[in-house]
Amino acid sequence: QVQLVESGGGLVQAGGSLRLSCAASGDTFSIDDMDWYRQAPGKQRELVAGIAGRGTTNYADSVKGRFTISRDNAKNTVYLQMNSLKPEDTAVYYCYAGITTLYGGGDYWGQGTQVTVSS
């Protein structure tokens, strides 16, 4: 059984910073892509940033230069450093990981963590 547990969300003023963490535990034989998505009220879930197993990163245009994704493979953890936050960054942020277990590969999601940016 695999679990992704997120932490680090909260309320911050515009211009502030937050750091999200997502740790994978359980039967994680190998972890490939680890991504952060977000979903604002009334909107579809969107990819914010992703990082491949070897460290290649990609970002949504709306967060380039402000957010940084990183991972610690020894801890099976992915991070999202969010700086210069804007009210439009307000959303529930979800962690995603492509994980291979002893029984095969699959897509796994965290439970979501709320990020609220006040103006």
Image (tube, helix red, strand yellow):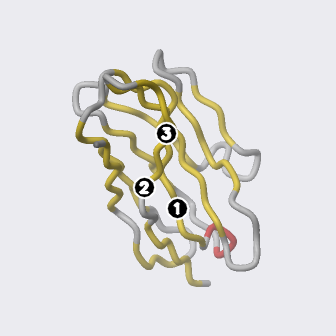
The residue nearer to you, when weighing 68 against 22, is 22
Q: Nearer the viewer, mark 3 or mark 1?
A: 1
Q: Secondary structure at mark 1?
A: strand
Q: Counting residues from the N terminus, which is met first, the one under dot 3 or under dot 1? A: 3
Residue 33: where, in percent of width, then height? 52, 29
110 lies above or below 106: below
Amino acid type shown at disc 1: Tyr
Q: Left or right? Give the position of 66 relative to 112.
A: right
- Residue 12 position, x and y percent, is 46, 76
Q: Are marks 3 and 2 in contact (CB under 8 Å)?
A: no
113 or 89: which is nearer to us? 113
Considering the image in quadrants, where does the N terminus appear?
top left
- Residue 110: numbered disc: 2
Vertical arrangement, residue 75 with respect to residue 67, above or below:
above
Q: Residue at x 39, y 40 (%)?
A: 78
Q: Is residue 61 above or below residue 18?
A: above
Q: Residues within 10 Å of mark 2 (few under 14, many from 20)?
A: some
Amino acid type for the residue under numbered disc 2: Gly
Q: Position of residue 26 (x, y in %)?
A: 23, 39
The outermost residue toward the bottom is 119
Q: Is residue 2 above or below residue 99?
A: below
Which numbered disc, 1 or 2, marks the residue that appears first in the sequence?
A: 1
**For discs 3 and 2, the disc positioned in front in the rendered view:** 2
Amino acid on which the number 3 mark rests in the picture: Ile
Q: CA distance from mark 3 to mark 1?
A: 13 Å
Quadrant in the picture for residue 5: bottom left
Counting the numbered discs, the total is 3
Residue 75 horizontal side relative to residue 9, left or right: left
Q: Identify the residue position indicated by label 1 in the image.
A: 93
Q: Where does label 3 land, which residue?
A: 69
Marks 3 and 2, the one that precedes in the sequence: 3
